[in-house]
Amino acid sequence: MLDDVLDRLTCPVCGAGLGRAGSAGGLRCPAGHTFDVARQGYVNLLVGRVPAGADTPAMVAARSHLHDAGHLAPLTAAIVAEVPPNVTTVVDVGAGTGHHLAAVLAARPGSVGVAVDVAKAAARRNARAHPAIGSIVADVWRRLPLADACADVILDVFAPRNGAEFHRILRPDGTLVVVTPTRRHLAELIEPLGLLTVDPDKRDRVQGSLGRWFTPLRQREVSYALRLTRPEVARFVAMGPSAWHTTEAELADRLAALAEPVTVTISVDVTTWRPHPAANSLI
């Protein structure tokens, strides 16, 4: 899997290209920096400590269950629809389970993907999500261990946005697809379960984080309702940032007060961006 994307990867220490490190099966740059490939198929290219807030195995598992149940299928379809037909390399930043990236690659035969996530639990899932995915551990807030202009498409689904790095690794005619929640996302659960609310200025914040490097092409709101069981609601809580702000006992007590099935709104903005040609002078 990694061999398919090896020419897109770079050393996180010196920025040089990476190749196979002989019979050991790891990766090495010309300067001798080496990186082991985990038995699950991913390579850890994170230098330094794992930043706070990385997804836990439980968060990744909850997200995987929801994908398997089809609850996020309309979102996945909307993402695939924004990817141009003739692409060779798709980079998914904050790839989570690799589900969206795998769907894109399945719909664009012959393409390959790089799944980037700071969590090893996510990297393990990504490595087996699709045969054409190369999975790496890296931090979006640092220089990404990827070559300049190596990607035709970048996916950013509920993930941090590093405009300068996205612009560097995306080709001048490439596409950036960003998915963010609207204020209606999971709104029925916020008060009864004590969840975090979506920033009312979310759209302005996205523009602020990307507008220096990218020009928005189009924005589509994807909204639909789900009828869920309490365990399914619990997984929606467990997969996101609210999981850090409630205990299992507190959540169980609040869930018990909800009548089944629970109607929940999924509402997200899917925004497509094009690299700004003048941005190189601003980096």
Image (tube, helix red, strand yellow):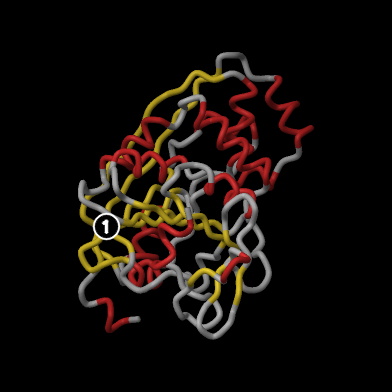
**Is 110 in front, or is 46?**
110
Residue sitting at x 38%, y 39% = 103
Residue sitting at x 51%, y 75% = 11
**Is 71 in front, or is 242?**
71
Crowding at label 1, few (<14), some or many (≥20) Cα neighbours within 10 Å?
Answer: many
The residue tagged with tag 1: helix, strand or loop?
Answer: strand
Direction front: furthest residue: 23
**Is 246 in front, or is 167?**
167
Q: Quadrant of the C terminus?
A: bottom left
Residue sitting at x 46%, y 26% = 70
Picture quarter containing residue 175? bottom left
Q: Position of residue 256 (x, y in %)?
A: 71, 20
Direction top: furthest residue: 260
Q: Is residue 253 above or below residue 282?
A: above
Q: Does residue 82 appear left or right of residue 184 in this picture?
A: left
Q: Does residue 210 appear left or right of residue 255 in this picture?
A: left
**Pointer 1: what residue?**
175
Q: Position of residue 201 (x, y in %)?
A: 42, 54
Q: Position of residue 189 (x, y in %)?
A: 57, 31
Picture quarter containing residue 249? top right
Q: Position of residue 251 (x, y in %)?
A: 71, 32
Q: Amino acid at mark 1?
A: Thr
Q: How many marks overall?
A: 1
Q: Is residue 171 above or below residue 127?
A: below
Q: Is residue 175 above or below residue 19?
A: above
Picture quarter containing residue 93? bottom left
